[in-house]
Amino acid sequence: MAKQKKTPRPKADTPKGFRDYFGADVAERKAMLDAIAGVYHLYGFEALESSAVETVEALGKFLPDVDRPNEGVFAWQEDDDWLALRYDLTAPLARVFAQHRNELPTPYRRFAMGPVWRNEKPGPGRFRQFYQCDADTVGTGSVAADAEMCMMLADALEDVGLKGDYIIRVNNRKVLNGVLEVAGIAEDDFRARGIVLRAIDKFDRLGVEGVRQLLTNGRKDESGDFTEGAGLSNEQAQIIINFVAVSIVAFNPAAAKEMPGLETFQLPHSQAIVASGDPLTFLEESIGSSEEGKRGLDELGVIANLVDAQGYTAMQIRVDPSVVRGLGYYTGPVYEAELTFEIEDEKGRPRQFGSVAGGGRYDDLVKRFTGQAVPATGVSIGVDRLLAALRMKGRIKADTAGPVVVTVMDRDRMGDYQAMATTLRQAGIRAEVYLGNPKNFGNQLKYADKRSSPAAIIQGSDEAERGVVQIKDLVLGAEIAETASVEEWKEQKQQFECSLDDMVAKVREILDR
């Protein structure tokens, strides 16, 4: 008789590009998002939870590759439709507003928080599932909505604990269109304009010469792959480079230090205007006679006046021509929040933490569904990056302490131990009874340590007869183990006795310390 082939055991591995989040991670993220949601709620925004699955048709232009419906997203075919896990939170908003526009108020103010999925190559710090946190106002073209987004973002960053550690920089897509007009790039030359915008978006990585190649004849990277250029002349390319480079050098010098070619970049003849620190004057010179550029400049002036009237300083929100990233997606004001404190890179060199949020006006949000232009503006916070920044600064507000563990000395008295846990819970204190094998008491305390428990409750038969419990202060025990000498360790009362009636009060003292 042939031996039956054993079914191989499945590997206990997360799929590539995914990860698991445990108690402290989830608690810290929730505390941060709750604080942000509280600010959004104060501004009158309503929460929206949309479906995690959308039709590929609804995702549309938000897809990484429109021609291949399952490229870049997790998609599958069902009957005649392609369905996909949502790629971001913007496409669902467009679909929701178009579908329910007759029932929703206009403007519609919503915020959304949740996971999104991208079927892209994972790498260090780059995952296929991650959290997004968005807020948008749909249905108004008022620049006051853009100013409000900047103010709300500032309030959110301060509320999570980053007061004095951020700057929100504001620019306008129309201003860059004015610069492109000055450079002689036709308004209907969508191909060239698209390449120019993508090239500018790579300025931080490729630097001056890399961007120059993309603006002119194209660029071959280290692997030999060739990227088509915009076909601009050297003179046209220099106009674009001067605008972007001077903007960064003059108005965001910390970023300039990290971009190839900018450390030695010489400011052109407008150096006096730039040195004055007036970005609006600099922009006025850069756009020449462009009417669209002038409209963008006017909008920036309105935003600057509105935020100033509400008491926000230039150290919180300011006009900054160096904000060029992502401009290809927007039709008006754009804004980016950067954290200004320094961290060390992988080579030990100091650098700014960088961007944690960004957004802007994109007035074609719903048009593809309804055929009618619906103006919109919104902001998205990078949840993982912001959480990492809060951890670096030690400003996590989440309660990550584990539950008080009621140990078990006698299996026959399980009801008594459950009653102690219930008493603690009724007082609002997290508590659990140890439900493993109680035979080895040391294992119970090891379990409490793994649970990050602040205290353990101990009651044997002797304590039960006297109506008392032993409380082991695990927080104090951990502190003593790290710093105290043997003599100091003997003097500290890591474990003490109290009446059962005083148990809650004594545990509360440990939690409040």
Image (cartoon, rainbow, N blue to C red):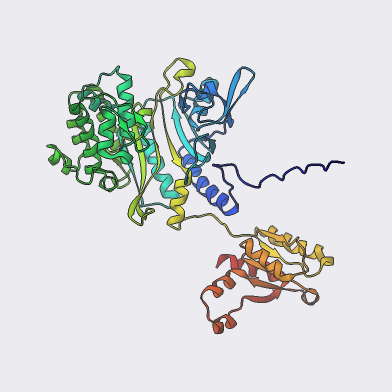
Residue furthest toward the right?
A: 1
Q: Position of residue 219 (x, y in %)?
A: 30, 31
Q: Position of residue 26 (x, y in %)?
A: 57, 49
**In the image, is 290 to the left or to the right of 24?**
left
Q: Which residue is depicted at the point 51% across and 28% down? A: 71
Q: Which residue is depicted at the point 81% across and 76% down? A: 465
Q: How many marks?
A: 0
**In the image, is 182 to the left or to the right of 10?**
left
Q: Position of residue 58 (x, y in %)?
A: 52, 22
Residues 189 and 159: in front is 189
Residue furthest toward the top?
A: 371
Give the vertical position of 413 relative to 33 (above or below). Answer: below
Q: Residue 204 falls in which quadrant of the image?
A: top left
Residue furthest toward the bottom?
A: 487
Residues 484 and 192: in front is 192
Q: Which residue is depicted at the point 54% across and 23% down? A: 56
Residues 400 and 198: in front is 198
Residue furthest toward the front?
A: 1
Give the vertical position of 25 relative to 46 (above or below). Answer: below
Q: Quadrant of the C terminus?
A: bottom right
